[in-house]
Image (cartoon, grey):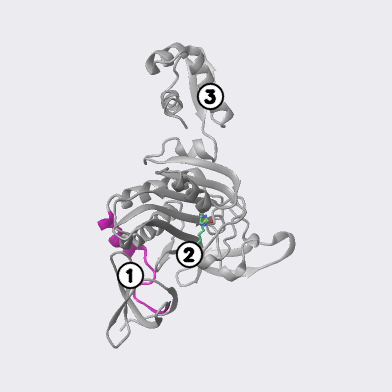
Amino acid sequence: MNETRHRVLDALADGPVSGPTLADELGISRSAVWKHVEALRDAGFEVTSGEDGYTLSAVPEFGGPAVEYGLDAPYTVEYHDSIPSTNARARELAAEGAENVVVLADEQTGGRGRLDREWASPSGGIWLSLLFRPDVPMAHAPVFTLAAAVAVARAAREAGVEATIKWPNDVLVSVASEGTSSGEDDDVVVTVGDEGEERKLVGILTEMEGEADRVSWVVVGIGVNANVDLASLPSAANPTSLEAVRGAPVDRRVFAQRLVETFDELSQDVDSVLDAWREYATTLGKEVRVETPGGVVEGTAVDVQFPGSLVVDTGDGQVTVSAGDCEHLRPVADD
Ligand code: BTN
């Protein structure tokens, strides 16, 4: 959304405000005011006109202008109803020199996951990629992935879903499966449980370019199973959705805003990321098996270290693992 349209929107939100007053305040013509109001209506904002002038009476449910409206973070939002992959689009924008852009979609037709896996992205999800250019060495970049996991876990909790983080960046929910049925009522019935099964709510894929001492750009791609039909997600991924856990759809506009705002806050203060991550971590204290490029590490996960490595106590000393696939074995029994 352009700067002037933003200002028109902000003025309307404090409304009612007359066309001539708006024109004076913004230093534009009355016909320009009218054009901006029409464009906002086309974008789904409800702008009513009365005796006192224009008033903003409703904001669209989802989409670029809806997420940008009231967003307290320095990002513009490029929205697509359907796109192959928001990460691929963000990489294109990076190559064109863009920064601080969120690419957001309702559906992806070629969503990508880690290890070049497919990522099912039906309509109703929050599929987004943040493109930014931090002034850090490449080796520090994993901290942004952890920041993204914290941002999503926090937004989920604000939406009433007790999300936790499995190292390094899977956002999970503990659910007790009560059963499944097929056909018309093809719903997986889930209830939140203390010691239930862990199901995946979110996946994060970070890509970047740069030289050893300086990152040129980072794209953090976040896929949130928000209000998606669980039957359309591959069961091998053991997925769940915000809607299934809450028993009601989540407000995707507010969720996306909170996610971007928290991510922005953390990415500006990377020293705060690890403590925030520990707060939501489900891995710490658990027995884990981590498949790393250098072999398998098994033991108790005891801590996380900057920029995002897992410290595992193998019983034979501590090993620090910077990348790998982590499996939770069982919680360590209390003495
Ligand atoms: C994983 O394998 O767990 C990571 C999945 C990441 C999916 C997100 S959805 C938004 C962005 N666009 C993509 O194509 N992938 C990421």
How far across and how far down the image is residue 223, in percent? 51, 56
Report which residue position mark 2 lands on: 173
Left-right relation of 232 to 271: right
Indicate the secondary structure of the residue bearing disc 1. strand
User: What's the residue at 40%, 67% (across, down)?
Assistant: 168
Report which residue position mark 3 lands on: 47
Reply yes or no: does residue 93 show up in magenta: no
Q: Quadrant of residue 148?
A: bottom left
Q: Earlier in the sequence, mark 1 or mark 2?
A: 2
Contact flag, marks 1 and 3 (Cβ < 8 Å): no
What are the residue bounds of the magenta stretch?
270-291
89, 38: nearer the viewer: 89
- Amino acid at dot 2: Val
Height in image: 194 above or below 136?
below
- Amino acid at dot 1: Ser
Reply yes or no: does residue 275 show up in magenta: yes
How far across and how far down the image is residue 261, in percent? 38, 46
User: What's the residue at 56%, 55% (across, down)?
Assistant: 243
Left-right relation of 198 to 84: left
Q: Earlier in the sequence, mark 3 or mark 2?
A: 3
Mark 3 within 8 Å of ligand 1, using the beta carbon:
no
Q: Quadrant of residue 16?
A: top left
Contact flag, marks 1 and 2 (Cβ < 8 Å): no
How far across and how far down the image is residue 327, in percent? 45, 76
How far across and how far down the image is residue 5, in percent? 46, 26
Question: Can residue 153 be seen by looking at this rendering?
Answer: no
60, 196: nearer the viewer: 60
Q: Earlier in the sequence, mark 1 or mark 3?
A: 3
